[in-house]
Amino acid sequence: MSSSTDSERPYHHGNLRQALLDAAFELLATRPAAQLSLREVARAAGVSHAAPYHYFADRDSLLKAVSTECLRRFLGAQQDAVARATAPRERLLALGLAYVGFAHQQPNAFALVFDAQLCPPGQPNAESAPLIAANEALLRDCVTALRPTDGPPDASGDALGAALWGTVHGLAQLVMGGHLPMDGVAPALRALLGQGTLDRA
Amino acid sequence: MSSSTDSERPYHHGNLRQALLDAAFELLATRPAAQLSLREVARAAGVSHAAPYHYFADRDSLLKAVSTECLRRFLGAQQDAVARATAPRERLLALGLAYVGFAHQQPNAFALVFDAQLCPPGQPNAESAPLIAANEALLRDCVTALRPTDGPPDASGDALGAALWGTVHGLAQLVMGGHLPMDGVAPALRALLGQGTLDRA
DNA sequence: TGTACATCAGTGAACGCGCGTTCACTGATGTAC
DNA sequence: TGTACATCAGTGAACGCGCGTTCACTGATGTAC
């Protein structure tokens, strides 16, 4: 048993894979993923630039894993917010605010989650697939809970779900881009949700 | 008078600035702007890699000009579409489809228009500012035309405008990311617009 | 408890690459005479 | 019409840089005895 702490130990880090992902996530606070270099991430994690190759085949693999990590946190934020609300409309509103709030606080992480070049949506990796499914289910549940259950099977439900996903996603982009203040999100969502759009019989 | 054509003349190109912008725009069909190098653009325009410095101070200046060029085309697409429709609701729908359609056909150009790192929305350059103003006016006109003119000054109009901008923008992102087929856009917009959301009172 | 050793996580030098930018230059152009 | 010349758009060699990736290596660790 040596007196050195974990962070000082140069060899046999034991948890370098996660440390690299954490370091990369923190770097996303300062730069888009496209501007992250493998060497920079290694530097931030306190190891040599060759060390990451023991855990990731190449830079792309590392970024994909970071993307999954971001998705995990993104989903968690939405789940927490929805769990805290009860009424159907408030649940949908809470989901929207959590969605946009995450994008607002971690824009580069948000962008990485939706980076189609790095993570083509048709072919998610094994770790991301269940997270994506859970996220889609969460949104679907929030939307369908707003609509009458005894109505028709509702072919337009998909269309409305897409529209609402688009709205929330777009508001996130506008906030990220500085075109809309975070304060403007809730009023915008209420303007859409509060007008009877979603609960006509 | 020489027999060489414009495209063969190595010296005194005469229109290199625009040729570089055109070349860059075409390259955007294959790569995001962040992956465009000055040398690549020069190569595509058929000049040496130092030639662009006669027209642009640095790579960023070139990209900013390309962004303005993209914005010009983006605005044009929307204006054309709106001009072709007459009824208020159809005009808004046409605008939305043109907006998303441009993003679908030129995703990297669309992304560059909204690149906040390169073009902070608070401080547009002299060439972009009027285009941005025109685009905002176009959207505002389409939205307000849907609402009763004799109602209150409508503080919620801004919120609804933001929500609709968000919807269209988000649908564009979802299409670009492969999360929604282009075919799904019109139904989604109709699901939102067709339910009396926008013409109560 | 002490010792020899196999493992393998992490090192650091080295590689080739394309990049952004600079700079002295060259040669086609149009103009003044 | 012909000639000398100033302009300046575009050239190409050169620079230093950080990158991704490879590779032989080293030395801390835990285990077998």
Image (cartoon, coloured by chain):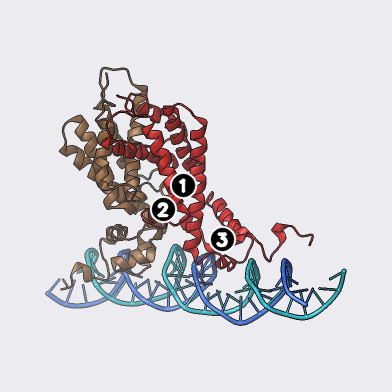
Chain colours: A red, B brown, C cyan, D blue
Question: For the residue labelled by badge 2, is the local secondary structure a helix, a strand or a loop?
Answer: loop
Disc 3 marks a residue whose amino acid type is Glu
The residue that mark 2 highlights is A115
Q: Which residue lies at the image location 24% right of the left edge and 27% below the top edge?
A: B145
Q: Which kind of residue does numbered mark 1 sit on?
A: Phe
Q: Chain of mark 2?
A: A
Disc with the residue nearer the chain's start (1 vs 2): 1
Q: Which quadrant holds the C terminus of chain A?
A: top left
Of all chains, the one bearing label 1 is A
- Alpha-carbon neighbours of circle 3 within 10 Å: few (<14), some, or many (≥20)? some
Residue A31, above or below B79? below
Horizontal and vertical percent position of residue B193:
26, 31
* C-alpha span from label 1 to label 2: 9 Å
Could you tell me which chain the residue with mark 3 belongs to? A
Q: Amino acid at mark 2?
A: Asp
Residue at 43% over, 48% down: A132
Residue drawn at x 48%, y 37% as measured from the top left: A98
Same subunit, tags 1 and 2: yes
- At mark 3, the secondary structure is helix
- Same chain for mark 1 and mark 3? The answer is yes
Is residue B107 shown above or below D7? above
Q: Nearer the viewer, residue A109 or A126?
A: A126
**Residue designated by label 1:** A110
Q: Nearer the viewer, residue A75 or B177?
A: A75
Q: Is residue B123 visible?
A: no
Q: Which mark is residue A40?
A: 3
